[in-house]
Amino acid sequence: MKKLLSIYMYIAGFLMIAITFLTQLLLRPFFKPQKSFPVISFLFRMTFRVLFIKVEVIYDEELERGKPYIFMANHTSFWDEFVAGATFPFYMCALEAHTHFRWPIYGWVVRAYGNIPINRKSPKSSWNSYLRAIERMHKDKISIIVFPEGTRSKDGKIQRFKKIPFKFAQEAGVDLVPVGFVNVNALSPMTNFWLQPTTIKVHFGQPISTQEIAQMSVEELRERVFLDIKRLSEQ
């Protein structure tokens, strides 16, 4: 029975994500990604409903619309970006591995959505991507989501954070919001092929203000955000 349910989830999930991707591609010539985001977010929410996945959202403090933020979250699953699309209160783009932009269809979609390619193997290239993100944040008033681990965790535990995202946070001049993704890895563990219904949570912590960020070193900020995300992802 569990395998039959998993097969249904794969088929239904594939169809819903395909519809969402196609919608993004069709809307892009007419609307900026931030304008089409409510439609895309609705389709992602419908995807999780179709898959019998309950999604809960918790805010420690209300976030201000129209204000750019840096969101930093733990990265435990392939589904993390879809969860973000379904639950975040407003449009945010991501820094995404540059190789993804070469993939057929998916690469077109992430480009249409407005994600920024980043080559994490090259520090200079990575920093240029972060500078581009800062420019977009201030010019277009959009938010950015960053996964400071740099890659998915294989066991669901938070890995050590890279240093460069926190240098970026200091240079960006916007508030930073730690986010905990709870139980997303249980949806499709890397050690298990079968999908399974579950309840996942997205917990938004209190923003760290630009004034607080300015008073911390890169190492202090990294440690502060690590502890915040660890706490949020365990609740």
Image (tube, grey):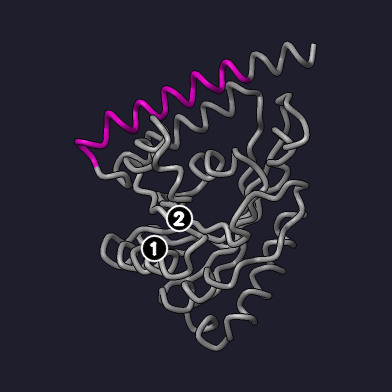
Q: Is 89 drawn above or below residue 136 in the view shown? A: above
The magenta span reads 10-31
Q: Secondary structure at mark 1?
A: helix
* Tag 1 and tag 2, C-beta contact below 8 Å: yes
| Nearer to us in this view, 142 or 206 | 142
Question: In the image, what residue occupies the spot 44% across and 58% down?
Answer: 144
Residue 108 % position (x, y): 34, 36
Mark 1: amino acid: Ser
Q: Quadrant of the C terminus?
A: bottom right
Q: Residues within 10 Å of mark 2 (few under 14, many from 20)?
A: many
* Label located before the other in sequence (1 or 2): 2
The mark found on residue 95 in the picture is 2
- Distance from disc 1 to disc 2, alpha carbons, whole Å, reads 8 Å
**Secondary structure, magenta segment, majority class:** helix
Apparent side of residue 93 relative to residue 159 in the rendered image (left or right): left
Q: Secondary structure at mark 2?
A: strand
Apparent side of residue 144 relative to residue 23 in the rendered image (left or right): right
Question: In the image, what residue occupies the spot 54% across and 82% down?
Answer: 212
Q: Which residue is mark 1?
A: 129
